[in-house]
Amino acid sequence: MSFQSSELILDQNGKIYHLKLKPSDVANDILLVGDPGRVDLVEKFLDETELKRQNREFKTVTGSFRGKRLSIISTGIGTDNIDIVVNELDALKNIDLETRQVKRQMQSLRLIRLGTSGALQEDIPSGSFLVTEKSVGFDNLLQFYNIARTEESSEIEGQMKKHFGWPRETAYPYVMDASPQLLEKMDDPQFIRGMTISAPGFYGPQGRKLRIPLSDEGLNNKIYNFRFGNLRITNYEMESSAIYALASSLGHQALTVCAIIANRRRGDHLPDYQGKIRELIQKVLEKI
């Protein structure tokens, strides 16, 4: 099977279309951040930088930390951007860009998202760190792919639909698991484990109301009260569900680690969280 140029798009220099990268430009260990400015922050921790490139919101730095080669890539905000980033990273490693054929030998990437998030449970304070064990997609990205879920994930999805009273015209929530190997690597008493919702927006989809009324004023209370065995929903962010879904389907490992910068139940917010972000970066780099 050969991919047509309209499906696997390269620029005039043979680089993948959005990321503007060639296969040799990117490492197998990749830190994903939303903000292009945070790429610069993570870069300060590297011992050496070999490549810097940016196209739109997609900024890449490749270098090394204590002898390990890694890349830092900004994704921008939202699961739609994750669809671009993960598919293009996989193409760089597992499709021959000259012949446009899938390679015989697959490479597995390790994708670790470093982000910020808002807690949904009162006992998760601003300034803490949270590892996403399961990610719940409120977006509709998975409706366009044939991606299998575990039996447990399907059961959680069914319970959520009933608990939330989910409307038929809205894409149903889907549940994806983190990489067990990366979860083990990030095992740390300072890291809370949780189940994270990836919302398709920052305001209404996360229950924030400014001038437009919400379709379900009680959604955040339903989220707060949801339980599946010992599992509860711990926080909101906007990318993890797509990272987990696409990575697992393509044979890659994925994990999200976030600094909690707000608590929605308490109504508080950590205005100066850059110190916590630097602390999180250092901890994650030392563990990978």
Image (cartoon, grey):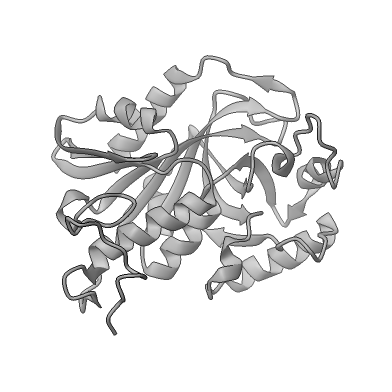
Q: How many marks?
A: 0
Can you give x and y, in whole percent of width and height, for residue 138 in the image? 66, 54
Q: Residue at x 50, y 19 (%)?
A: 273
Can you give x and y, in whole percent of width and height, for residue 21 in the image? 23, 51
Can you give x and y, in whole percent of width and height, for residue 106 in the image? 25, 71
Q: Nearer the viewer, residue 285 or 37?
A: 37
* Relative horizontal placement of residue 28, taking residue 195 as reference (left or right): left
Asked if residue 178 can be seen in this view, the reply is no
Q: Nearer the viewer, residue 181 or 274?
A: 274
- The furthest residue to the front: 12
Rendered position, 217 above or below 260: below
Asked if residue 116 can be seen in this view, the reply is yes
Q: Residue at x 85, y 58 (%)?
A: 165
Q: Quadrant of the N terminus?
A: bottom left
Can you give x and y, in whole percent of width and height, for residue 160 in the image? 76, 59
Name the image quarter holding residue 149: bottom right
Rendered position, 79 above or below 103: above
Rendered position, 156 above or below 213: below
Q: Residue at x 77, y 42 (%)?
A: 224
